[in-house]
Image: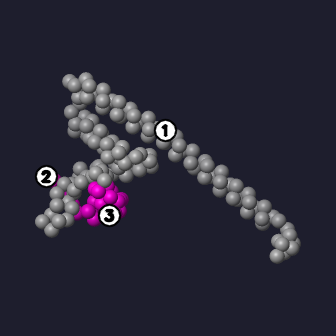
Amino acid sequence: MGGRLMRIGELSERTGLSLRTIRHYEDVGVVAPSERSTGGFRLYTEAEVRRLALVRRMRPLGLCLEDVRALPDVLERLPDAGGPLPENDEEAHEELVAMLRKYWVEADARCVDLRREPASAEEFAHSLHGHLAKLLDAPTTAVKAVR
């Protein structure tokens, strides 16, 4: 295997993922070390860095584990990722287009949902502010009478 090898700690630093998360992704088949050292340490290459960086970018989309495993494989098949364009195989080309379209529609829909979340959070925070303002404006004699 060509390229510089790095241990899991460096992979963690480079991707911003915890060691535990990387090991979990290995256990569920999202990523695998390129090699193991003679001492049994996991060794990774730039390909694993790129794959995990992609997976990290996918996290907010809330994709199921099956899609988290599959989508990087689909993207690696694209010509700009080094894969051959399946132009001579119409069925493979249509399959790739269909898979990308499916993931794009899901990602786009999730982005719409994510854009709604800040507005909902701000609305809730505003309601808390209103409750607090009412309490602070309430006469203190009413609070003493309750005690």
Local secondary structure at mark 1 = helix
Local secondary structure at mark 2 = loop
Residue marked by disc 1: 109
In the displayed structure image, the side of residue 57 where residue 115 appears, left or right: right
Local secondary structure at mark 3 = helix
Q: Which mark is residue 19?
A: 3
Q: Is residue 83 magenta?
A: no
Which kind of residue does numbered mark 2 sit on? Gly
Residue marked by disc 2: 2
Residue at 23% x, 30% y is 85
Res 40 visible:
yes
Residue at 44% x, 46% y is 61
* Main SS class of the magenta portion in the image: helix
Quadrant of res 75: top left
Which span of residues is magenta-colored? 1-27
Residue at 86% x, 70% y is 142
Density class for disc 1 (Cα within 10 Å; few <14, some 14-19, many ≥20) is few
Locate residue 138, reporting x and y percent.
83, 65
